[in-house]
Image: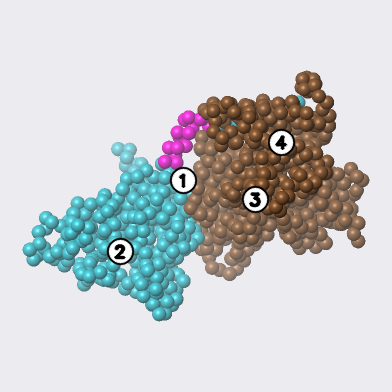
Chain colours: A brown, B cyan
């Protein structure tokens, strides 16, 4: 860094920071996701902890320059442990006026705004619906920030003048110019991204060279011009020693399934129908044909889950992936898996609802659907993931419970953890919990016919594969006679089977970890109880409140059905229980109903994750209330 | 001579009957179909434990419970999807799908067409009684227009599907039709369906004595059968009638009935070619319309056969090809991904 500053022979102030939040915002054709990912990956490689939040427009390709077409990528990186992508930005890159309009309200006072002036001409300002004659860069409305107005488009064109590329191709490289500039500003090496460009465009040398040139031009622009007065210095994080990688939730889910199937010694079969934000799991798993992974893009959601049921029946780990509307369609088939006691994993990457709702926005509002969303008494275990990397562990556990307890299991993730990413100190294959997946090959009823519904002490029925000699039997969606599995309309038998199915799911509580305090201590004045993707925001809020001296604790649930056995006892130890959820209070209702405690709901249904500051404010308000 | 000691006695139809009481209505055509299937199974050279029956919902779909094989009775219309998962996972299994006209053509229409285009090696028996039996007597998508039922007291205004045209349009590789009352014909067709590598679709006219009695009696009853049915066989001319006196000739793409006993040459007749899709479409379509004049007989037999790779074979081949090229990744490699870094 010294040498860089000497070379530039100008006074640049270095600002030290524990963490910095950068938001890249532009038109969905501007390559903001790629820019953000490259910046993130570089930070990760340099050893910083981080958390990301990509935000996509709902439209595939809204008209260029409009607010509907804004695509954002937010990253919070730093030297301390980071659990959220951050509430407010330190740096906002706005590639056009629509991006500025969308995101400026979350730029911290005194924060840095880098605006691409080419995106603030009359046409762009009109498209962003600024009143005639108003330019937010000129009218004083951005005076609270350090504003760098740069004609990125012009500089990129100048840098690539001799490249022989068309205007359109040159313009496509302007995100690399911005990235280079940011690398300079944060003193990050360009090597990682140069390697990426070489790999990606290796077969198109002119495009490859243009991108590298644009990237370096951005760096040099920062280094040579007099306008920049600040550079940041963010140290590497003191993370636990080990080997790390970067991972998104959907990617972690995919490889969690591969590992579970291999540990169980069976095939992995995915029956899926594309839907936002779950499709990436299908995309990812489809790459693993070499590992025998069978992915089946079904004709609809119902066929997707039914094919998974068929696959499990035939001896595989059957999985189906979807989001809320698709899960609604799968309801009847889930009932079939419940009554046939077929182990499948049903993955719901939740999004805003009801109906098509907010396809690209996050929500946690399918909890009740997961627990109750089938007809009849139809119990299913439900597990949730608390962070992108945690999707691996949670889905692995979902598969383990499904296979070991002969039951369909719902795995809940959501758009926020599915698309977000973080560094992951990944486990070794050896360290993964074993999965006991036995197939019965001997008749369990000597002298008689095989009893497919004869249960063990966990109420679990034996698993057999069609093709096993001598154990032929028939199962299906009609009520099963106890032990034989034959069709039975006997009323007492139905009641018995209903109880047996429920007890089997309840017994799973004996095999899952007890609930424990994540931050703070037991018997605090207030417990913040969460589940799923609110983990990072709640943890950060509670840790900050603890530092500020408040008597607060955080309990986070992974299994939401059954609840951990000790949950009721644990919660009763707190004076107050506050349940923040991105829904109208679904977990809160369940906890109140089950444990008869006056848990309080803190609801946010905006398609957006909780901000740490709003959580802190609510916790303090609740602490101080009567 | 050690053969004497090791030879397993040949199975019989009885071996394929489960211990469950059959509970169809007296006189239901399903009984005849069940017994023909049980009859041919000992001849199929498949281990008993490798048969799997998968069904949807409806009277027909209870079939699964009556076969002493592996069986999975699924949900309404979705048997094809369940069977696809079974076959994709374990191609060795001999999968039979039992379905009815409501199950296959109404609620499960989507899965029906997609199964056929994918061509899993599955035997698909469609019991067509042109009525909803289990829900007690509403018209089905195969009921004739104008049908009076509980839900259509003034006659149905729905245009029915022609299931064979639908199957051919969905790229089925084996399309055939039989009837519950003709036991021999069924046996021949089921065996041929079994030999076919791919989805073998067999429509079976099945009488529902309670809600749609005698819907197919012109084709099944002795008095009318010879005039109303034409049994097609590959390479054989199209001949029917009590004394085999009538034939069918193709006038361009239009079939015409000719009287062989009255001067028409038997050499000019349409020779059935089950590999010809265009002619299979003509066969499936023109003879199905009762309103057509002159009145045409209804064809039975194998309409169309095509050799096309099955889904599961292509899937297996793709897995083998990718594995050969890239190899199987160890879990530790998958866990680590492409790029890692170390924090000391």
Highlighted magenta segment, given as a residue range: B314-328
Would you place residue A493 above or below residue A149 in this image?
A: below
- Crowding near pointer 4: few (<14 within 10 Å), some, many (20+)? some
Confirm whether residue B136 shows in the render.
Answer: yes
Query: In which image quadrant can residue A230 be found?
Result: top right
Q: Please tell me whether residue B326 belongs to the stretch shown in magenta.
A: yes
Can you tell which mark lies on residue A127?
3
Q: Nearer the viewer, mark 4 or mark 2?
A: 4
Chain identifier of the residue bearing label 1 in the image: B
Which residue is label 4 attached to? Answer: A150
Which residue is label 2 attached to? Answer: B179
Q: Alpha carbon of mark 2 to alpha carbon of mark 1: how far?
A: 31 Å
Chain identifier of the residue bearing label 2 in the image: B
Q: Please tell me whether residue A160 belongs to the stretch shown in magenta.
A: no
Give the SS element for disc 2. Answer: strand
Q: Position of residue A590 (x, y in %)?
A: 74, 60
Q: Alpha carbon of mark 4 to alpha carbon of mark 2: how far?
A: 79 Å
Front-most of residues A296 and A422:
A422
Which residue is label 1 attached to? Answer: B88
Chain identifier of the residue bearing label 4 in the image: A
Instruction: Kindly identify the residue that appears in the image at 70 percent across and 42 percent down.
Output: A94
Give the SS element for disc 3. Answer: helix
- Crowding near pointer 3: few (<14 within 10 Å), some, many (20+)? some
Give the SS element for disc 1. Answer: helix
Chain identifier of the residue bearing label 3 in the image: A
Would you place residue A252 above or below residue A183 in this image?
A: below
Can you tell which mark lies on residue A14?
none
Q: Earlier in the sequence, mark 3 or mark 4?
A: 3
């Amino acid at each position: 860094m010294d040498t860089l500053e000497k070379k530039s022979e100008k006074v640049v102030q270095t600002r030290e920071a524990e963490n910095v939040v950068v938001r890249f915002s532009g038109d969905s054709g501007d390559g903001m996701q790629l820019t953000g990912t490259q910046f993130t990956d570089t930070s990760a490689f340099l050893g910083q902890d981080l958390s990301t939040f990509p935000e996509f427009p709902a439209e595939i390709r809204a008209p260029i320059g409009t607010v509907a077409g804004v695509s954002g990528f937010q990253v919070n990186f730093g030297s301390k442990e980071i659990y959220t992508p951050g509430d407010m930005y330190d740096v906002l890159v706005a590639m056009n006026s629509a991006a500025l309009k969308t995101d400026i309200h979350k730029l911290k006072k005194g924060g840095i705004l880098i605006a691409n002036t080419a995106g603030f001409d009359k046409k762009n300002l009109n498209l962003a619906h600024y009143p005639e004659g108003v330019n937010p860069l000129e009218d004083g409305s951005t005076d609270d920030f350090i504003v760098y107005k740069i004609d990125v488009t012009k500089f990129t064109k100048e840098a690539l003048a001799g490249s022989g590329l068309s205007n359109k191709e040159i313009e496509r490289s302007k995100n690399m110019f911005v990235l280079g500039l940011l690398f300079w500003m944060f003193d990050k090496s360009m090597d990682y991204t140069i390697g990426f460009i070489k790999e990606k465009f290796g077969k198109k040398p002119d495009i490859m060279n243009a991108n590298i040139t644009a990237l370096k031009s951005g760096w040099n622009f920062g280094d040579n011009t007099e306008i920049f007065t600040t550079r940041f210095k963010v140290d590497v994080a003191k993370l636990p020693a080990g080997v790390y990688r970067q991972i998104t939730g959907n990617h972690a889910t995919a490889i969690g399934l591969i590992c579970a199937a291999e540990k169980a010694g069976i095939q992995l079969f995915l029956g899926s129908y594309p839907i936002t934000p779950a499709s990436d799991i299908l995309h990812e798993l489809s790459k693993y044909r070499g590992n025998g992974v069978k992915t089946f893009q079904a004709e609809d959601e119902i066929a997707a889950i039914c094919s998974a049921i068929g696959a499990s029946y035939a001896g595989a780990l059957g999985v189906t992936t979807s989001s809320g509307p698709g899960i609604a369609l799968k309801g009847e088939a889930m009932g079939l898996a419940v009554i046939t006691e077929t182990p499948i994993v049903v993955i719901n990457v939740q999004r805003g609802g009801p109906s098509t709702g907010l396809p690209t926005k996050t929500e946690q509002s399918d909890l009740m659907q997961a627990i109750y969303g089938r007809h009849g008494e139809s119990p299913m275990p439900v597990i949730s993931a608390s962070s992108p990397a945690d999707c691996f562990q949670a889905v692995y556990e979902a598969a383990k419970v499904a296979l070991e307890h002969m039951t369909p299991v719902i795995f809940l993730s959501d758009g926020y953890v599915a698309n977000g990413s973080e560094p992951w100190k990944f486990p070794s294959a050896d360290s993964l919990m074993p999965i006991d997946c036995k197939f019965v090959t001997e008749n369990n009823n000597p002298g008689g016919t095989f009893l497919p519904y004869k249960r063990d002490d966990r109420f679990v029925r034996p698993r057999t594969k069609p093709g096993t000699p001598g154990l032929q039997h028939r199962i299906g969606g009609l009520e099963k006679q106890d032990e034989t599995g034959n069709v039975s309309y006997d009323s007492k038998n139905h009641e018995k089977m209903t109880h047996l199915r429920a007890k089997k799911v309840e017994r799973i509580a004996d095999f899952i970890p007890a609930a424990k305090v994540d931050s703070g201590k037991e018997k605090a004045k207030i417990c913040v109880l969460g589940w799923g993707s609110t983990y990072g925001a709640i943890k950060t809020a509670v840790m900050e409140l603890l530092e500020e001296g408040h008597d607060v604790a955080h309990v986070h649930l992974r299994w939401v059905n059954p609840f951990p056995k000790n949950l009721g006892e644990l919660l009763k130890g707190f004076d107050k229980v506050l349940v923040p959820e991105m829904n109208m209070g679904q977990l809160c209702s369940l906890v109140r109903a089950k444990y008869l405690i006056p848990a309080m709901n803190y609801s946010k249904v905006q398609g957006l994750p909780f901000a740490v500051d709003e959580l802190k404010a609510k916790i303090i308000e609740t602490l101080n209330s009567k | 001579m050690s053969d004497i000691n090791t030879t397993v006695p040949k199975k019989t139809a009885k071996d394929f009957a489960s211990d469950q009481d059959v509970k169809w209505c007296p006189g239901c055509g399903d009984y005849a179909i069940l017994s023909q299937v049980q009859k041919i199974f000992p001849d199929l050279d498949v281990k008993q434990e490798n048969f799997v029956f998968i069904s949807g919902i409806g009277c027909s779909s209870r079939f699964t419970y009556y076969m002493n094989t592996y069986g999975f009775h699924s949900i309404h219309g979705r048997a094809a999807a369940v069977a696809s998962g079974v076959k994709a996972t374990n191609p060795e299994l001999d999968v039979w799908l039992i379905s009815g006209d409501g199950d296959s053509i109404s609620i499960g229409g989507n899965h029906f067409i997609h199964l056929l285009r994918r061509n899993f090696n599955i035997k698909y028996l469609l019991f067509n009684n042109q009525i909803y039996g289990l829900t007690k007597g509403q018209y089905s998508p195969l009921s004739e227009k104008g049908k009076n039922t509980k839900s259509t007291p003034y006659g149905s205004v729905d245009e029915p599907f022609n299931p064979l045209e639908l199957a051919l349009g969905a790229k089925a590789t084996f399309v055939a039709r039989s009837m519950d009352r003709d036991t021999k014909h069924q046996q021949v067709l089921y065996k041929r369906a079994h030999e076919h590598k791919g989805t073998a679709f067999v429509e079976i006219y099945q009488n529902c004595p309670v809600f749609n009695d005698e819907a197919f009696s012109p084709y099944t009853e002795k008095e009318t059968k010879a005039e109303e049915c034409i049994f097609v066989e590959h390479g054989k001319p199209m001949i029917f009638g009590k004394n085999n006196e009538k034939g069918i000739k193709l006038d361009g793409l239009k079939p015409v009935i000719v009287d062989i006993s009255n001067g028409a040459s038997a050499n000019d007749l349409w020779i059935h070619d089950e590999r010809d899709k265009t002619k299979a479409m003509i066969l499936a379509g023109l003879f199905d319309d009762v309103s057509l004049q002159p009145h045409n007989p209804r064809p039975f037999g194998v309409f169309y056969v095509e050799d096309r790779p099955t889904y599961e074979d292509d899937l297996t081949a793709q897995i083998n090809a990718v594995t050969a090229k890239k190899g199987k990744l160890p879990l530790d490699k998958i866990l680590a991904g492409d790029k890692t870094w170390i924090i000391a």
